[in-house]
Image (cartoon, rainbow, N blue to C red):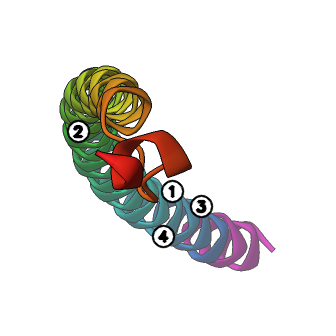
Amino acid sequence: MNKGLRFYTAVLSIAVVALWLFTAIQNSEFVELKRQQSELFKNETLDRESFDSQTSKRMNELQTEISFMEAEINLLRKKVDLLEGRIDDLVFEFPRYPTNQSTSN
């Protein structure tokens, strides 16, 4: 009976050591997977931050271009208003159709 107990104890000890090794291997694989996941997340976060930064920069550039275009449009409107005023002045000074008074001379 003593030999049987030693045998079962040895088998149980081997099983415990095997289970411990299996758990250690699984934990190391889990840790490695977590490390890879955190590295991917870090890279993704950096990529996202870079993308957000580039997008924000481009949006600012576009906003600046829009502001310049709006300023140019306002200048063109002022020029059109001035030209319309000059045209009105010319039409008033030189009527298109002569009046009877100017033909009688």
Q: Do residues under tags 4 and 1 come within 8 Å of each other at their CB atoms?
A: yes
Q: Do residues under tags 3 and 4 come within 8 Å of each other at their CB atoms?
A: no
Q: In the figure, is residue 24 to the left or right of 105?
A: right
- Write down the residue under mark 4: 22
Region rendered in magenta: 1-10
Q: Identity of the amino acid at label 4?
A: Phe
> In the rendered image, is residue 56 in sight?
no
Point 41% across, 44% down: residue: 95
As for residue 21 lying within the magenta part, the answer is no
Q: Which of marks 3 and 1 is in front?
A: 1
For residue 96, which quarter of the picture? bottom left
> Disc 2 or 1, which lies upstream in sequence?
1
Q: Nearer the viewer, residue 12 or 38?
A: 38
Give residue 46's mark. 2
- Write down the residue under mark 1: 20
Q: Nearer the viewer, residue 74 or 6?
A: 74
Give residue 79's mark. none
Q: Nearer the viewer, residue 2 or 64?
A: 64
Q: Identity of the amino acid at label 2?
A: Leu
Q: Do residues under tags 3 and 1 come within 8 Å of each other at their CB atoms?
A: yes
Q: In which quarter of the image is the C terminus?
A: top left
Task: Assess disc 4: are there few (<14), some (14-19) or many (≥20) residues with their C-alpha within 10 Å of its C-alpha.
Answer: few
Measure the alpha-carbon separation of dots 2 and 1.
38 Å
Task: Assess disc 2: are there few (<14), some (14-19) or many (≥20) residues with their C-alpha within 10 Å of its C-alpha.
Answer: few
- Write down the residue under mark 3: 16
x, y percent for residue 12: 66, 68
x, y percent for residue 58: 22, 40
Q: Identity of the amino acid at label 3?
A: Val
Measure the alpha-carbon separation of dots 4 and 1.
5 Å
As for residue 3 lying within the magenta part, the answer is yes
